[in-house]
Amino acid sequence: MSGLNFLANELQLLVCSFLRHQDLVALMRVNNSFHSLIEPLLYTRVELHRPGYHEYYQYADEVEIKPVLHRNYHEHERGNRYKPSHHDSKFAEKAAIFLRAFGDSAVTSDGDDVQSSARSQAIANYVKFLCLSTNLGWIGDPLGTIAGFRNLEHLELTVSWPYYPKEWDSAYDAFALDRAPLVKLRTVRLRGYLPRAFVLYVCRGAPGITDLELALLDRPIGSSLVRERQNPPPKWKDDNDEADGGETLDDRDTASSNDSVAGEYDHEECIAPRALSTFDGVDVTAQFPALTRLSLGRPAESSNPGVQNAYVSVHHDISILAEWAALIRATRGTLEHLILDQRPFAEYIEMDATGDAEFLATYSYGPGYARFVEHCLPALLEENVQWPRLKSIRLYGFDVPPEVAYSSEPQKLLLMVEARFKPMGVDVRSGLGRRMMYEDDDGVIPLEDGFGGSRIDLEEEEEE
């Protein structure tokens, strides 16, 4: 140990970078010198999700353009026992405890507001890389706590729906948009259930963002989820009026309630997932001047007859596709890699009838596919526009590759996109993708890869 003490700080840090997390914690306790050296290193990168999470769910075709960020302290824990998604709840709790350590420091035992301790703020300033898999199911302001990590360069959140829906309401209401922006952000990857205000906050005031990944879901609606609401929702009168039955629908559901005027809410009480369109009404033309990688995900209405009994928000689907088109047009001058990930959805019980590959091969070309072709594809195929830096396009969940046993359709989208971009030397590939499973009584998806899709291993399905 004395030999390590005699090394220059730079060499000591290099040696420590090869140690596992628990080894760093032990070494930090040796003396004050090691504590001062290691504490910033310990908190610079914070990953709280099950080991091997990214490696297990990453699309094989994306490995070259989105390298996995390995953590040395995860190596000894990787293995099959960490692949099933039931481990997510354990790591979600760890992430909540981590955030609580910063958020709760601002409240006394009597509930009186006080200033966060200098110690908590100092540790928060160390964090440059934050990757959490959690939900918003704890009292306080978890999103505001994340906004307190002022030196963040990489922010990656995978957020599941909380067990008690009102906890999401609490997090939604607690977050204030008027915070100082996270100006140092370079990578933003947000998946699952996050309020629109938080997403707008993260993306604003950070012109250096080069990597943007959005796969966001809106708040499910229906009386199964929040007892005082109805599904179909009552007819909407005016933003300030009460709805039929004496209830007042808040502005988060205004767009959905307007759908009912158009006659979309005419099904039984089955609720499908719906996408969150973040930049609706926001000019994104100059929002991301340095973006080189753009990854977008959405739930898509499949052609599976079982979905016909569920409410599908066409309004939200068209809104998210309009947002995709706007982002594509706004960033094509700097974009190098474009990834579009469409998830045909199905009720959870569908797993008893079809395998993942079989379902996608049979039902991918549904209404969601048709809406993409109408509302977003033109932005991708426009003639006489320049893509000076584009290197690759990845399409997941649109086409069925020929190697899939159940395939009966040609790769329609791939052929159109290849015709436009292959002459430019762009590497265009189309993959099977994943389906999105949801509980039809409340519209909630399981966490899995953060967007309701489990990994598909064609070889394993064929063996079964």
Image (cartoon, rainbow, N blue to C red):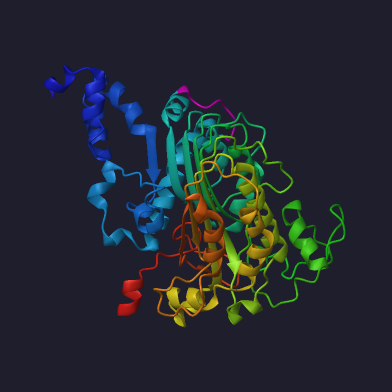
Task: From the top left corner, tell me how far across and down residue 246 is, in percent.
Answer: 83, 63
Relative side of 25 to 203, left or right: left
Task: From the top left corner, tell me how far across and down residue 336 is, in percent.
Answer: 50, 44
Task: From the top left corner, tell me how far across and down residue 44 is, in percent.
Answer: 38, 32
Q: Judge by depth and name the residue closer to the eye, 9 or 143.
A: 9
The answer to if 112 sits in the magenta stretch is yes
Q: Quadrant of the C terminus?
A: bottom left
Q: Judge by depth and name the residue closer to the eye, 3 or 328.
A: 328
Q: Looking at the rendering, which quadrant does residue 73 occupy?
A: top left
| Residue in view at x 61 percent, y 31 percent | 205
| Residue in view at x 75 percent, y 76 percent | 266
Q: What stretch is highlighted in magenta?
A: 111-118
The reply to whether residue 234 is visible in this rendering is no
Relative side of 27 to 400, left or right: left
Q: In which quarter of the image is the N terminus?
A: top left
Q: Looking at the rendering, which quadrant does residue 347 occupy?
A: bottom right
Task: From the top left corner, tell me how far across and down residue 151 is, in percent.
Answer: 48, 28
